[in-house]
Amino acid sequence: MFYKSNGSTGKVFRRSGALLIAGALLLLSACSDPYEHELPPSGFVTAGQAEDIASKLKGPDKELFKRWAARSITSQKFPGETLPLNVKIALMNQTRYEALKAEEEAKAEAKLKADQLAYEEKVRAHEESRKLLEATDSFIKNYFVVRSISYDIVPIFNSYGGLAYREWQFDLELTNKTPKEVIGVRGAVLVKDAFGKELGIYNLRMEPSLS
């Protein structure tokens, strides 16, 4: 049929040949793309393979792929991470992993700062409370003589007669140094041991008359 064909048929044959050549070139080009390079089914590459593959990549992708290769042999995975089929997916996985890792580290750092600020605020509040108590104590001593009679840890029972918790109980004697009658005292007591160590601050309320 070819020998009997006209000129237009011959052109069709030549055009088909050109398309086949173009298709082959396109396939060759796709196969030479380093980002489409297929990775082993095992999901990891050796250090030498990683260096070879990375050398063909662009800019920061070189080190990004090396970091993926180093991580691929460990158990460090982000939730839902699958084995990459090619270099492009490996780079996407590593980018996602590093973003999640950075987010976790930022949250941990923020929590650490918040905990530190909370601790510093607690220390500051305690120091202010201590100074206030010392000032109050100095003021009170001008009017009362306070003497510790005894102290103990006593049980506190609930309505069913069971032990609920234990708390300190302090017996104090207050002597009024002023000519006025005192009908009540309310405040806080700072308790220290024999070595000066603070044991705690406790609320105080006394309503009977003091002699």
Image (cartoon, grey):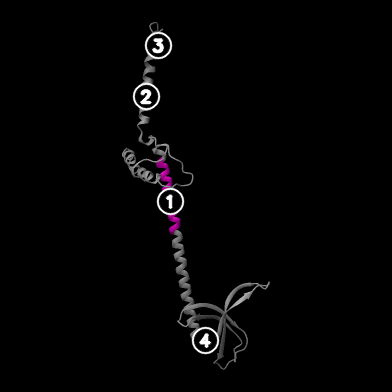
- Residue 136 locus on image (x, y percent): 50, 83
User: How far apart are the two marked residues, 2 and 3, measured between alpha carbons?
Assistant: 23 Å
Q: Secondary structure at mark 3?
A: helix
Q: Earlier in the sequence, mark 3 or mark 4?
A: 3
- The quadrant of the rendering that contains the C terminus is bottom right
Residue extent of the magenta highlight: 90-109
User: How far apart are the two marked residues, 1 and 2, measured between alpha carbons?
Assistant: 43 Å
Crowd class of label 4 (few under 14; some 14 to 19; many from 20; radius 10 Å): some
Which amino acid, mark 4?
Ile
For residue 144, above or below residue 45: below
Residue beneath disc 2: 24
For residue 34, above or below residue 185: above
Residue beneath disc 1: 101
**Residue 140: which disc?**
4
Query: What residue appears at the point 44 percent right and 49 percent down from the top-left corner?
Result: 100
User: How far apart are the two marked residues, 1 and 3, measured between alpha carbons?
Assistant: 63 Å
Labels 4 and 2 touching (C-beta < 8 A): no
- The quadrant of the rendering that contains the N terminus is top left
Give the quarter of the image for residue 109. Answer: bottom left
